[in-house]
Image (tube, helix red, strand yellow):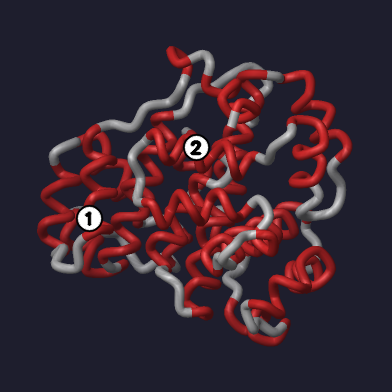
């Protein structure tokens, strides 16, 4: 834990979540949340409402047509998607912009990871809503690494090549991975324990005892997001980088190919998010 603690030494620089984000996270613990209740919660923050509506009209949701009100957006994209959008906006606003930080690339990767995590979770019977939020947060540790040790981050990124290679490089040069740092941040944000556990085990899901399907889903989603960013075959990248995870989750390449959303659609809202 001492290795991870150093990324939280500058407490004044740490991102903090707004109250509305905490209240959105609380809804994951309930099964009786209604669309109207969610809309009313988001509407308490006019700036958040406006940005959520803009994102709901993005290509990420298939250009379903212009919607001007939160209830209309909720009816079109559903409760989980609306909640995910609102949390995404809260997270974007929470993080600082340190020197050398490529904000649009960061959020493209986050959105792709979240989208893939949601899809994979549905295929293996995990909570797709929590998986999506965990995907949005998985790379947060990279930002804290950059704030703490930018030179070493630059070295690691220069050495990273194939999708998924960043994890072992981080473990070698930092003593931990960004997934474990993200888990600690999520714990400090009082996020649901299953989400924190998924983030932590994503660093090395095959070594987790007991095995964490949620952590495995996140790691595979990260591989797919890396491959999409690099413009290489996502299914082949997953087979090369994480064949044991695919086997453990009983996911075949054919299943992946049939269910993966286009990378461009997953990241289409990044420009709107970072504007």
Can you identify the residue that label 2 sits on? 184
Residue 250 located left or right of residue 76: right
Say which of 180 and 71 sits in front: 180
Q: Is residue 107 left or right of residue 32?
A: right
65, above or below 152, in the image: below
Q: Position of residue 236 (x, y in %)?
A: 81, 72
Residue found at x 31% / y 63%: 80
Within 10 Å of disc 1 (Cα), the crowding (few <14, some 14-19, many 20+) is: some
Of circles 2 and 1, the one toward us is 2
Circle nearer the N terminus (2, 1): 1
Picture quarter with the N terminus: top right
Residue at x-position 81% and y-position 40%:
169
Q: Residues within 10 Å of mark 2 (few under 14, many from 20)?
A: many
Which residue is found at the position 57% from the left and 60% from the top?
215
Residue at image point 77% right, 44% down? 166
Q: CA distance from mark 2 to mark 1?
A: 21 Å
On residue 169, the disc is none
Vertical relation: 194 (above or below) 176: below
Q: Quadrant of residue 58?
A: bottom left
86 w.r.t. 185: above or below: below
Where does the image place residue 147, in percent across and percent down from the top left?
61, 20
* Label 1 SS: helix
Q: Which residue is mark 1?
A: 27
In the picture, measured across the screen, residue 49 lies left or right of residue 7, that is: left
State the SS at label 2: helix
Task: Provide residue 196's location: percent of width, then percent of height.
Answer: 45, 49
């Amino acid at each position: 834990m001492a290795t991870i603690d150093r990324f939280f030494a500058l407490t004044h620089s740490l991102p903090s979540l707004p109250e509305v984000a905490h209240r959105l996270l609380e809804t994951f613990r309930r099964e009786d949340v209604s669309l109207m209740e969610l809309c009313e919660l988001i509407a308490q923050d006019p700036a958040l409402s406006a940005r959520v509506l803009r994102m709901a009209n993005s290509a990420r949701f298939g250009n379903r047509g212009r919607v001007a009100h939160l209830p209309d957006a909720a009816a079109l994209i559903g409760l989980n998607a609306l909640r995910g959008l609102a949390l995404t906006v809260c997270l974007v606003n929470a993080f600082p912009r340190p020197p050398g930080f490529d904000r649009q690339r960061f959020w493209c990767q986050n959105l792709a990871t979240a989208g893939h995590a949601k899809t994979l979770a549905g295929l293996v019977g995990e909570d797709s809503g929590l998986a999506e939020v965990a995907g949005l947060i998985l790379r947060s540790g990279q930002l804290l690494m950059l704030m703490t040790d930018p030179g070493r981050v630059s070295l690691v990124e220069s050495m990273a090549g194939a999708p998924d290679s960043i994890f072992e490089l981080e473990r070698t040069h930092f003593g931990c991975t960004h997934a474990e740092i993200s888990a600690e941040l999520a714990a400090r944000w009082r996020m649901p324990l299953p989400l924190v556990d998924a983030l932590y085990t994503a660093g090395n899901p095959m070594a987790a005892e007991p095995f964490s399907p949620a952590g495995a889903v996140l790691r595979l989603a990260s591989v797919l997001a890396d491959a999409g960013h690099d413009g290489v075959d996502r299914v082949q990248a997953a087979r090369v980088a994480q064949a044991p995870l695919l086997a453990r989750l009983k996911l075949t390449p054919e299943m992946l190919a049939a269910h993966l959303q286009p990378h461009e659609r997953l990241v289409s809202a990044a420009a709107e998010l970072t504007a």
